[in-house]
Amino acid sequence: MTTLLTTDPDRAAAVLRRGGTCAFPTETVYGLGALAHDADAVGAVFEAKGRPPDNPLIVHVQSADEVAALARLTGPAERLLSAFAPGPLTLVLWARPGLPPSVTAGLPTVAVRVPASRHARDLLRATGAPLVAPSANRSGRPSPTTWQAVRDDLDGRIGAILQGPPTEIGLESTVVDVTEAVPLVLRPGAVSLDDLRRVLPETQPVTRGHDAARRSPGTRHRHYAPAARVRLAEVADARPGSDAAWIGLSPPPPGYARVAVCRDVADYAHRLFDAFRRADADGLARIDAEPVPDEGLGLALMDRLRRASQR
Ligand code: TXA
Ligand code: MG
């Protein structure tokens, strides 16, 4: 198929309304959209990404009110929505009947998010229906933060790409499971643990070996990995070379083929996945990434770096 490139949300929405797939920018990463209630369209998303069918999708809607049509809202869920929606937060809730089983991979729960980016909201409004949208990468590749990265992975495999700017945050949304008494952060993101605890003090991060794999099926799969080997390295452990890239807050010693010195943790998060892809495009063997403190957005950044480095 020919992939339509467009900056017009109405043209992109027309592709979706016909049951096609269309990638679009959100404030976190680009998503690959399809009508959530159209089982064939949802199937095309799994097919285009090469995504394992046991990994459920996030449903994107325009407002907190629309969340209630898809899932049962509890008090804690409502408080998180009023504090953080629209924004980079995904809630895992008990699903109402009606969605194709492929959306939730057969689970009794559904993940829902209200994106804040103007481009995503324009597209949702023009489409007039909830959209599933996993990150718009081939399964196993880093999430795309630019429309060009989407094209590199999915050109010819999807109906359209809504072209927008590079995504602001650059890391995927915070996923919080609120189906049980203790809210659990399944995936850290820009809404930090401290932010969540200001609203729901009992919120806990999911720990390894906990029932994390059961509650967040996606964490079983390889993720966030460039082809180059990612190595966590302080400046003192830097190993410059013509086959290596550096990314971090500090300037490295000379000799790296590519260097990204970031202004702060937010800039680091914003640039990380693009740095992974550029290193791969140049055929580099290694990416040395400087660690940051495990706090705030740094916790989400370190989560992605650790996953990328463990393989
Ligand atoms: O920022 C984001 O969340 C982006 C943008 C496009 O919205 N989307 C995204 O989707 O990152 P994806 O499919 O790459 O990641 C969704 C994560 C996966 O880890 C998946 O396993 C988890 O959410 N998830 C989805 N439904 C779930 C459910 N019912 N229970 C537990 N985890 C779920
Ligand atoms: Mg993904």
Image: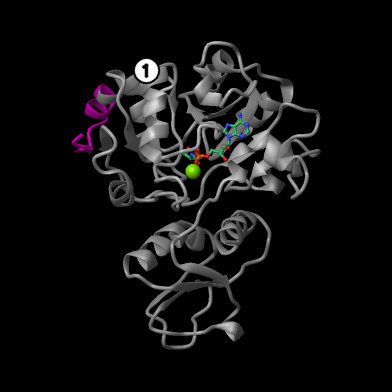
Amino acid under disc 1 = Gly
Is 195 situated left or right of 144 in this image?
A: right
Locate the N terminus by quadrant: top left
**Residue 182 on image: x %, y %:** 79, 34
The front one of 137 and 61 is 137
Left-right relation of 281 to 97 = left
Q: Residue at x 40, y 40 (%)?
A: 49
| Image-quarter location of ligand 1 | top right
Residue occupying image coordinates x 34% and y 28%: 123
- Disc 1 residue lies near ligand 1 with CB under 8 A: no
Q: Looking at the picture, how far across and down is residue 124, in whole percent?
A: 38, 25
- What is the count of numbered marks? 1
Q: Nearer the viewer, residue 27 or 224?
A: 224
Instruction: Check the image and report above or below for 241 versus 262.
Output: below
Q: Position of residue 129 (x, y in %)?
A: 40, 18
Whether 91 is drawn above or below 302: the answer is above
Residue occupying the point 46% across, 38% down: 51
In the image, farthest residue toward the bottom: 254
- Which contiguous range is marked in magenta? 1-14
Q: Position of residue 132 (x, y in %)?
A: 45, 28
Q: Quadrant of the C terminus?
A: bottom right
Q: Residue furthest top?
A: 97
Residue annotated with mark 1: 128
Q: Disc 1 on helix, strand or loop? A: loop
Is 303 placed above or below 290 here? above
